[in-house]
Image (tube, rainbow, N blue to C red):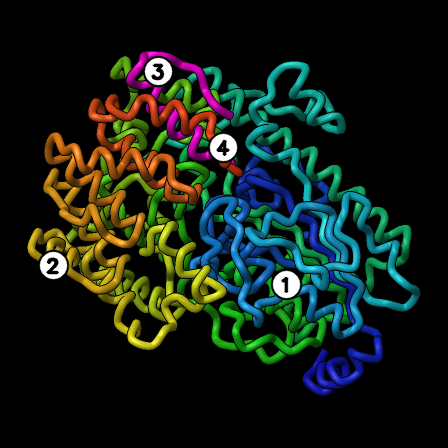
């Protein structure tokens, strides 16, 4: 399709002129190695391979987060989750009026759009997003003559399914031949996991579930063929983030962010050599690029607020140099990690470096791999690579040569020879934060308070007088100087005071902001005062926060109390009440409270 044809398609779009159908087939928690077209001899995905043989396989495609909800929020809006405040797992934001789900633009131009069935966008699905959004959604329901955009998402590869064993595992993979099931003895384990039977079984289970996904993908491809639509349908096959196993899902490492992407473009809809049969494309692709790419292929103008770029279709812009991803609150635990990836290196900025690499999370703890990691760590039997994942803190910066060190175990941030690379990647990270106005350095409680005042989260850093605030937040969060951290306590902005108090707490130094108007600042200040010593007023402030009317403040307080160690015992009655608090709309505050109670009581019960 040349430029003249493209313009003709665009002009005729509203009238429903002939345009390509577009099919998305996605699965959960899946890394590229489990697709045989990516070269792993244990993998067997003949249907997906057939699409790769008739299309293009991408080698450098990355998610914007290591977990589903923030990732899907970015995909559906074309905006980074940290830019609109949807970076937290299972939050519920108010969308700015200009932010629409991108299928809405397709529908406006005459497409029939269906979703089967997952949304998980971190906001309520607007009515104009889909023509049909259900487990019955299918392109076959479209009116005659309409082009379609149809999404099918499969869950058999989800972490919860990988954990099923024995007969239950066989229920997940009913279409995988016995002779194709992966032998646990043959899997290649990454160095950050121990070599145990349970770990090998989990890895083998993952391969099996991807084979089942391949069967389902093949079923949809057969339906396209039956409907005589193969020559008119562009097909995307992808996984939403890395494997649902420890140090993969939820993380910004290659294991959590690198994803498979295979695309077939029928010859009649190809631009130049794009989508050539059996081709391999090593350009950097972000999931933020999916929405503009689909619109571009459909002849629909890309909205100016989109933060990705089209990588297929006519009139493409300069290819990406960097990929960016985030790790913020995962379920009940707060983090602020940012990753920047170019063709060779991965830079990671740990803003909460004082927290463990891995914080206890109920869902993640359900993995048999976590059970073995904790058991062997307690016995002192983990290798250094595996033990690091359970370390009590992490470096402020990490730098990996992803070509030479694909498992990213050798942190090169301190290597003087790579100082220019470190500085370049650090600069790219800061430039990206400034460009998208990253909200990750705000405490979630403050984000919610600002949203109530301003109407949406996207507006928070775009208020007059806040032009320098993000740079100031980055500077104080990056500072190791006590004087700079104390100075933040006097700043006019609550987010700055929050960081000042949090960093004082890390040094076991008081932060006298117990009467601050911001609940998030009061929680951080109470934590600092209590870590510095006995403080009756700080204890009263924390008890009040554990029973706050805002659920996010209760969660922030629970996380703060968890950092008090044995000092958490004075809050036993408040934590007990928090476990059963009927106001909790999620079980996240209860999970944190229960974890603390288990530690101080020596019990093991778990809130799901």
Return the residue nearer the eye: 275 or 439. 439
Sequence order check, earlier mark of 4 and 3: 3
Q: Position of residue 112 (x, y in %)?
A: 80, 63
Q: Earlier in the sequence, mark 1 or mark 2?
A: 1
Q: What range is drawn magenta here?
A: 586-608
- First-in-chain label (2 vs 4): 2
Measured in 3D between alpha carbons, the distance from the residue under mark 1 to the one under mark 4, in whole angstroms, is 28 Å
The residue tagged 3 is 375
Badge nearest the viewer, 3 or 2: 2
Q: Which residue is the site of mark 2?
A: 487
Q: CA distance from mark 4 to mark 3?
A: 26 Å
For the view shown, which residue lies furthest in the right direction?
A: 144
Magenta-drawn stretch contains 594: yes
The furthest residue to the left? 483
Is residue 548 visible in this depiction of the protein? yes
Between marks 2 and 4, how big is the CA–CA gap? 36 Å
Q: Assign the magenta stretch its main secondary structure.
A: helix
Closer to the observer: label 4 or label 3?
4
Which residue, given by chain and number where applicable, does mark 1 sit on? Answer: 101
């Amino acid at each position: 399709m040349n430029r003249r044809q493209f313009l003709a398609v665009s002009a005729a779009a509203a009238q429903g002129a002939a345009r390509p159908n577009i099919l998305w087939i996605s699965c959960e928690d899946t890394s590229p190695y489990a697709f045989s077209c990516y070269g792993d001899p244990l993998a067997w995905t003949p249907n997906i391979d057939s699409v790769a043989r008739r299309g293009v396989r991408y080698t450098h495609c990355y998610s914007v987060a290591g977990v589903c909800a923030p990732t899907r929020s970015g995909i559906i809006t074309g905006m980074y989750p940290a830019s609109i405040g949807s970076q937290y797992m299972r939050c519920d934001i108010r969308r700015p009026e200009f932010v629409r789900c991108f299928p809405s633009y397709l529908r406006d131009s005459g497409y029939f759009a269906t979703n089967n069935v997952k949304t998980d966008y971190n906001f309520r699905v607007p009515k104009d997003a889909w023509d049909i959004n259900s487990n019955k959604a299918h392109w076959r329901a479209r009116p005659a003559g309409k082009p379609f955009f149809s999404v099918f998402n499969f869950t058999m590869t989800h972490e919860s399914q990988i954990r099923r064993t024995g007969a239950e595992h066989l229920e997940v993979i009913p279409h995988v031949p016995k002779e194709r099931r992966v032998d646990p003895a043959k899997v290649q384990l990454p160095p950050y996991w121990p070599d145990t039977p349970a770990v090998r079984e989990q890895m083998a289970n993952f391969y099996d579930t991807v084979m089942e996904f391949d069967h389902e993908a093949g079923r949809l491809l057969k339906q396209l063929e039956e409907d005589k639509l193969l020559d008119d349908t562009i097909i995307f096959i992808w996984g939403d983030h890395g494997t649902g196993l420890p140090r993969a899902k939820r993380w910004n490492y290659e294991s959590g962010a690198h994803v498979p992407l295979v695309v077939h473009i029928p010859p009649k809809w190809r631009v130049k050599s794009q989508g050539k049969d059996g081709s391999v494309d090593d350009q950097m692709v972000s999931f933020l690029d999916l929405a503009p790419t689909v619109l571009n292929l459909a002849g629909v103008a890309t909205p100016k607020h989109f933060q990705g770029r089209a990588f297929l279709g006519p009139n493409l812009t300069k290819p990406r140099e960097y990929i960016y991803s985030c790790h913020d609150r995962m379920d009940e635990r707060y983090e602020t990690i940012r990753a920047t990836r170019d063709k060779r290196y991965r830079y990671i900025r740990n803003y909460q470096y004082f927290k463990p690499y891995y914080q206890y999370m109920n869902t993640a703890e359900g993995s048999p791999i976590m059970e073995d990691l904790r058991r062997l760590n307690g016995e002192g039997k983990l290798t250094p690579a595996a033990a690091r994942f359970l370390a009590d803190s992490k470096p402020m910066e990490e730098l990996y040569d992803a070509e030479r060190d694909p498992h990213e175990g050798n942190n090169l941030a301190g290597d003087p020879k790579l100082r220019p690379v470190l500085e370049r990647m650090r600069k790219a990270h800061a430039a990206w934060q400034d460009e998208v106005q990253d909200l990750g350095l705000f405490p979630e409680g403050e984000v919610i308070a600002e949203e109530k005042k301003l109407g949406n989260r996207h507006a928070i850093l775009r208020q007059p007088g806040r032009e320098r605030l993000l740079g100031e937040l980055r500077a104080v969060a990056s500072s190791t100087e006590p004087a700079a951290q104390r100075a933040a306590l006097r700043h006019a902005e609550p987010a700055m005071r929050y960081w000042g108090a949090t960093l004082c707490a890390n040094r076991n130094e008081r932060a006298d902001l117990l009467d601050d108007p911001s609940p998030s600042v009061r929680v951080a200040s109470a934590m600092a005062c209590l870590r510095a010593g006995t403080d009756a007023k700080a204890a009263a402030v924390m008890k009040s926060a554990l029973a706050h009317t805002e659920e996010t403040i209760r969660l922030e307080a629970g996380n703060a109390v968890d950092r008090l160690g044995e000092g958490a015992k004075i809050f036993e009655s408040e934590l007990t009440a928090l476990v059963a608090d009927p106001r909790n709309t999620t079980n996240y505050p209860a999970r944190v409270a229960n974890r603390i109670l288990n530690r101080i009581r020596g019990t093991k019960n778990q809130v799901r």
